[in-house]
């Protein structure tokens, strides 16, 4: 708590999409931002605080909108924030090179009666196009301060904040604006409605009464609902209905059209007085670029190349970092094993928490690289061209150009998330296309599936990471589109919705903007891993640990183990080398650590141990390459005997591990499901992982990790999960590929199902989504597994 | 879709055949070729669509230029009020234009 109260004001940042609002927001708030969601929806809400003079300025970035009609959820959010939270000032970010359309939002803001300061952004682009804007005249016409800014170069930021604070602090209220005079007939009806609003006590303030009257006359459903919530206002709605009919009769157009026309009329006048455009023959660079990038023949080819490049960048670019992260968690697990005594706590921390969370967090660099690549596509403006080029295709499958963005967010470029993707469908007004998009979005390759793919591709298709990811993207898209087509021609038949897509000029993104974008999304991924995944990892660990195998059954294994050790030590040569069982144990420990130990450390150790270990290493190499000669031949017989002993011991360990797992709750579920999944080649361990994946897809990796590392005889063994799976006899490339496809398509995680329910309003759509995807996954897996087994593809 | 249904849906804008447009000397925007430009005569279609189009600047008398067609001939790209926007062909068919003049 501070001693003196710091006064604070709230600034809302409004503006069209592509007007450079985010860049300006970044320039204003710097790194002091907080990203969350607007209540009830997953539209991003960005906030930041800065100190201006003795004031705390709280900046809220409203969603980018073209208008404040309740057309999309973004428009409703922006409007409700202004109406309900009453910011002290609204900064309207305007693209100076595209002033006319941008002023439409400005006019709507002014109509709302809020204090507005205009940021005339991207003035350099306008100047490049020989557009000259007379700021003074524009400011006089609109009766608000107009400040030119350049978010990218951070020019005019201080001036903008000065003006915003000064206007917010000024005792003068926002100008009561009758400047938008809609003509005698309209004004008459407006004042009748205003009168009703004031009389019935909905509002006392004339400015807000005027705005509400305009909105009601426009037939705005949101405002209608809000006023209807206050009971006994029926008289108002009768008046509104009467006025709408009356005006429609006179103008042969509904009032909303008349208002829009009038606003653009006012804007046209303002433009005429304040803007001069020199005619120029120069073709803009952006258009020249576009001629190539969206060219009928070259465009689609470039699109494929860009997507392919994206995977190469993401997977190969992040590879070294991913290796560092994996090595860190491996080291952490080993370190904890050394410190914490063996037992339930060690098992919880190492197998439950570190293996589980580490398996997911290890992929953080990959996720970050993917987000960076997507941010580049978005910020340069190429993403809109992708929608432009592919709309015809999407429409053919009963979807919408805007579906593309939702599918992209869901993981169209691999690495998204179906939850925000499904939320993004709110821009789709047509309910059928929206629902179809919601239902197919979970088929995309979301970020949670990537760790599964990366694990299996890394283990079984090591040389083909990029082509495999490319193939998986194609498969996921074709599945989603086919499902979309089927859904839209059966459960959801009907015509298509309008498609209005702005193609903004190509821009060079700012490094700062890209990094902020990437960081925010990556951080959300990490947070998810830190919370949901942690809880699920512990739950799954418990499922895979309890109940423990009964003592007498464990004893059968330990007896076998002891007999084996006894027999080995009974061998005279071994008996001479290892004086006791303890000696043997300490050699085992030494052997586990030797490969990573330094030369000096080795020299300090028991020289007999070092010699035996070296012989064993050579023996190992000889197995793979018979040409190698063994130098420590005096220990050769002992080494061979030890090797046999060690391998036999390993077999017992695996059998014990299997018995233990099968006995647990998880194991029992997996076994119970075996008859279902046997035809597609999954064993009970995979089944457990798939059940866990219902909580969150990345849990498939952590569960497999847990399944294959639990009960391990030597926890210091430094095999990664990928290496371990490769060593399992049941696993082959076909099995890996079948599992990848199954994970891609089967039931969305429960978070997604909850969102589907919320967005579609009905549980039956969520259930439908879970059932149809699982059936689809099973059928595809069955076909791949059967055909693959028959042709013996990838079975060795 | 029959003309009667459309005229009920859209008060001032009966669905027009190409022949009718010819009689009015109006052309559907979807019939413009890349490089052609002209002024909007009227925006048709259902009220939601009309409002959306008008908010994006598709107002009577505004100049629209066809930049190009997408690789699959649909959607189309236009320049209007200094910005680029893309519409599907069937939507562009709801926008009636005066006869085109070739861009300089």
Image: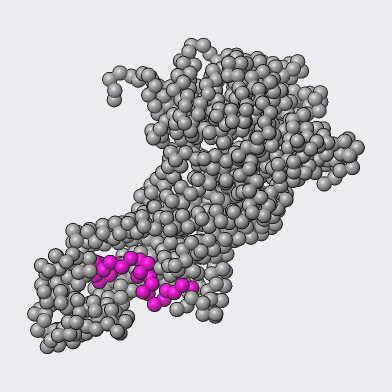
Measured from the top left, where is residue B5 in percent x and y?
Answer: 83, 42
Q: What segment carries the magenta color?
A: A710-734
Measured from the top left, where is residue A325 in percent x and y?
Answer: 33, 56
Question: Between residues A1 and A241, which one lies in front from this camera angle?
Answer: A1
Question: Between residues B10 and A573, which one lies in front from this camera angle?
Answer: A573
Classify B92 as above or below A779.
Answer: above
* Left or right, A6 with reference to A88: left
Classify A199 as above or below A464.
Answer: above
The quadrant in which residue B7 appears is top right
The quadrant in which residue A268 appears is top right
Classify B49 as above or below A747.
Answer: above
Q: Residue at position x 67%, y 18% from top? A: A273
Can the viewer see residue A720?
Answer: yes
Q: Residue furthest front?
A: A281
* Left or right, A357 with reference to A471: left
Question: Between residues A470 and A96, which one lies in front from this camera angle?
Answer: A96
Residue A302 lies within the magenta run: no
Classify A9 as above or below B45.
Answer: above
How many labels sit on residues? Answer: 0
Principal SS element in the magenta part?
A: loop
Q: Residue at position x 87%, y 39% from top? A: B21
Residue A712 lies within the magenta run: yes
Can the viewer see residue A748?
Answer: no
Measured from the top left, where is residue B92 in percent x and y?
Answer: 75, 41
Quadrant for the N terminus of chain A in the image: top left
Measured from the top left, where is residue A138 in percent x and y?
Answer: 61, 18
Quadrant for the C terminus of chain A in the image: bottom left
Q: Residue at position x 71%, y 47% from top? A: B69
């Amino acid at each position: 708590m501070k001693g003196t109260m710091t006064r604070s004001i709230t600034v809302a940042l409004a503006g069209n999409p592509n007007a450079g609002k985010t860049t300006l927001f970044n320039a204003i708030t710097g790194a002091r931002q907080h990203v969350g969601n607007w209540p009830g929806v997953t539209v991003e809400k960005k906030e930041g605080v800065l100190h201006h003079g003795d004031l705390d300025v709280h900046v809220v970035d409203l969603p980018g909108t073209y208008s404040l009609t309740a057309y999309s959820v973004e428009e409703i959010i922006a409007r409700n924030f202004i109406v309900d939270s009453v910011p002290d000032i609204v900064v309207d970010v305007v693209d100076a090179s595209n002033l006319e359309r941008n002023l439409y939002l400005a006019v709507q803001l002014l109509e709302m009666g809020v204090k507005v300061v205009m940021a005339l952004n991207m003035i350099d682009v306008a100047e490049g196009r020989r557009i000259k804007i007379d700021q003074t005249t524009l400011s006089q016409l609109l009766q608000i301060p107009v400040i030119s800014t350049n978010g990218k170069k951070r020019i005019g930021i201080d001036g903008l904040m000065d003006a915003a604070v000064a206007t917010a602090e000024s005792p003068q209220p926002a100008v009561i604006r009758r400047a938008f005079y809609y003509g005698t007939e309209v004004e008459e009806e407006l004042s009748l409605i205003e009168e009703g609003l004031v009389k019935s006590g909905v509002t006392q303030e004339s400015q807000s009464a005027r705005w509400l009257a305009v909105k009601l006359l426009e037939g705005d459903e949101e405002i209608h609902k809000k006023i209807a919530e206050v009971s006994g206002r029926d008289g108002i709605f009768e008046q509104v209905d009467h006025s709408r009919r009356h005006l429609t009769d006179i103008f042969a157009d509904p009032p909303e059209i008349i208002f829009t026309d009038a606003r653009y009329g006012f804007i046209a006048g303002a433009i005429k007085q304040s803007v001069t455009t020199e005619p120029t023959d120069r073709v803009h660079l952006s258009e020249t670029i576009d001629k190539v990038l969206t060219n009928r023949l070259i465009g689609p080819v470039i699109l494929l190349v860009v997507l392919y490049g994206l995977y190469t960048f993401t997977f190969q670019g992040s590879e070294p970092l991913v290796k560092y992260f994996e090595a860190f968690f491996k080291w952490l697990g080993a370190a904890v094993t050394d410190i914490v005594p063996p037992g339930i706590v060690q098992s919880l921390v190492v197998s439950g928490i570190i293996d589980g969370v580490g398996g997911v967090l290890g992929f953080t660099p990959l996720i970050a690289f993917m987000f960076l690549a997507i941010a580049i596509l978005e910020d340069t403006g190429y993403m809109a061209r992708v929608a432009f080029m592919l709309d015809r295709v999407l429409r053919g499958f009963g979807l919408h150009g805007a579906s593309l963005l939702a599918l992209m967010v869901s993981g169209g470029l691999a690495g998204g998330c179906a939850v925000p993707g499904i939320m993004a469908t709110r821009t789709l007004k047509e309910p059928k296309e929206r629902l179809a998009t919601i239902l197919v979005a979970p088929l995309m390759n979301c970020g949670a599936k990537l760790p599964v793919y990366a694990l299996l591709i890394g283990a079984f298709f090591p040389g083909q990471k990029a082509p495999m990811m490319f193939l998986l993207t194609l498969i996921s898209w074709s599945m989603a589109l086919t499902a979309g087509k089927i859904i839209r021609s059966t459960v959801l038949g009907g015509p298509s919705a309008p498609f209005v897509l702005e193609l903004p000029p190509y821009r060079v993104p700012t490094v700062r903007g890209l990094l902020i974008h990437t960081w925010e999304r990556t951080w959300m991924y990490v947070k998810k891993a830190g919370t949901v995944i942690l809880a699920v990892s512990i739950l799954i660990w418990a499922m895979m640990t309890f109940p423990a195998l009964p003592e007498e059954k464990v004893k059968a294994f330990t007896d076998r183990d002891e007999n084996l050790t006894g027999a080995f030590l009974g061998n005279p040569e071994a008996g001479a080398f290892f004086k006791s069982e303890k000696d043997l144990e300490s050699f085992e420990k030494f052997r586990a650590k030797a490969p990573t130990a330094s030369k000096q450390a080795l020299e300090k150790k028991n020289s007999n141990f070092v010699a035996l270990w070296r012989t064993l290493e050579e023996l190992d190499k000889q197995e793979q390459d018979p040409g190698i000669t063994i130098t420590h031949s005096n220990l050769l017989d002992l080494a061979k005997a030890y090797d046999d002993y060690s391998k036999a011991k390993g077999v017992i360990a695996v059998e014990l591990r299997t018995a233990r797992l099968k006995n647990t709750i998880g194991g029992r579920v997996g076994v119970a499901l075996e008859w279902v999944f046997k035809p597609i080649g999954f064993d009970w361990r995979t089944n457990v992982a798939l059940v866990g994946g219902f909580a969150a897809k990345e849990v498939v990796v952590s569960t497999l990790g847990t399944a294959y590392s639990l009960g391990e005889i030597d926890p210091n063994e430094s095999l990664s999960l990928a290496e371990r799976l490769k060593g399992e006899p049941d696993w082959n490339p076909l099995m890996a590929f079948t599992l990848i496809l199954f994970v891609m398509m089967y039931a969305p995680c429960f978070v997604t199902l909850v969102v589907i329910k919320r967005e579609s309003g009905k549980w039956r759509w969520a259930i439908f989504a879970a059932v149809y995807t699982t059936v689809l996954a099973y059928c595809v897996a069955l076909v791949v597994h059967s055909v693959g087994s028959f042709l013996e593809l990838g079975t060795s | 879709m029959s003309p009667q249904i459309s005229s009920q849906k859209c008060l001032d804008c009966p669905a027009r055949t190409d022949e009718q447009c010819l009689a009015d000397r109006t052309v559907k925007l979807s019939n413009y070729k890349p490089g052609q430009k002209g002024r909007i005569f009227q925006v048709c279609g259902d009220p939601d669509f009309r409002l959306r189009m008008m908010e994006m600047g598709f107002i009577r008398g505004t100049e629209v230029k066809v930049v190009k067609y997408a690789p699959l001939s649909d959607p189309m790209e236009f320049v209007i009020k200094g910005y680029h926007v893309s519409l599907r062909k069937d939507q562009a068919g709801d926008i009636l234009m005066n006869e085109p003049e070739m861009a300089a």
